[in-house]
Structures are given as C-alpha cells and as structure tokens.
Amino acid sequence: QVRLVESGGGLVQPGGSLRLSCAASGRGFSIGAMGWYRQAPGKERELVATVARGGSVQYADSVKGRFTISRDNAKNTAYLQMNSLKPEDTAVYYCNAIIASDNFWGQGTQVTVSS
C-alpha cells in the first residue's frame, strides 16, 4: 500500500516563503511523475507543478518564477519551494504521484497567505 504524506504548510505573510514536502512510503514501487495541486475554497483543484522521474518540470503560469518543484528519487520525496507568496496562493495543497499507472494522493496541507 502506497501512502503520500505532505508537510510544510502553514500561515505566512505576503511575500514570504514556504517549502512543502511529500514523502511516499510503501514497498515495491517505482514512482513516475510527481506533482503538486491546490484547491482554494469554492474552486476546483488545479495543477501547480509536476516533475518527471527524469527531472523535467512544468508549472502553472500563475506560479512560474516563484515556485520550484524538485524531487529526490532515493528518498521517494518531492518538494515545492514557494517564494514571493501571494494571498491568492492560499489553498489546500495536495501531493500526487503516478505509480504503475495509478494516481495516488496525499491528504493535503493548508497554505494560508495573509497579513
């Protein structure tokens, strides 16, 4: 059974930074792409960033130049470095991983950007 656990969310002032982590646990799996999605109140879940196993990345236009996604394959962990945070970045952030063509999701971590 694969489990994804996010950490690193919290309350930050506009212009501040946070780093999210997503650790995958379980046995006998190889993770394909990993990604971060977010869902704000009253809105649909949206893609923030993805990173392939080989390291290629893609970002939503709204976070380009501010967020950086990375991964450590040896640790089965993905990261999202978020800089220059804005109030509109406030949302629950979810980790996603593709394993053997199946989608796995974490439980989500709250990010709140407010003064």
Image (cartoon, helix red, strand yellow):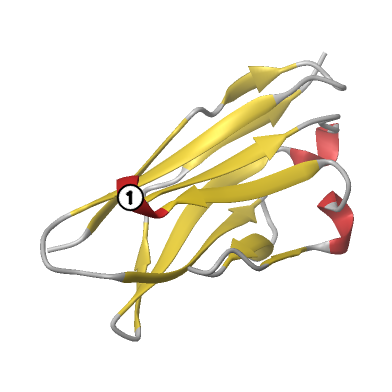
- Asked if residue 53 is positioned above or below residue 77 in the image, the reply reads below
Residue 32 lies, in percent from the top left, at: 41, 73
Q: Which quadrant of the rendered structure holds the N terminus?
A: bottom left
Residue, disc 1: 74
Instruction: Classify 87 as above or below 64.
Output: above
- Identity of the residue drawn at 47% across and 54% down: 95
Q: Which quarter of the picture shows residue 101? A: bottom left
User: Which of the two residues, 112 or 65, is positioned nearer the viewer here?
Assistant: 65
- Which residue occupies 12% across, 67% down? 28
Q: Quadrant of residue 50?
A: bottom right
Q: Residue at x 85, y 21 (%)?
A: 14
Q: Nearer the viewer, residue 97 or 71?
A: 71
Q: Residue at x 68, y 56 (%)?
A: 42
User: What x and y, as percent, mark residue 108?
Assistant: 45, 45
Q: Of helix, strand and loop, which one carries label 1?
A: helix
Question: In terms of depth relative to the viewer, which is nearer, 30 or 4?
Answer: 30
| Frontmost residue, 63 versus 46 | 63
The answer to whether 110 is drawn above or below residue 47 in the figure is: above
Left or right of 2: which side holds 48? right
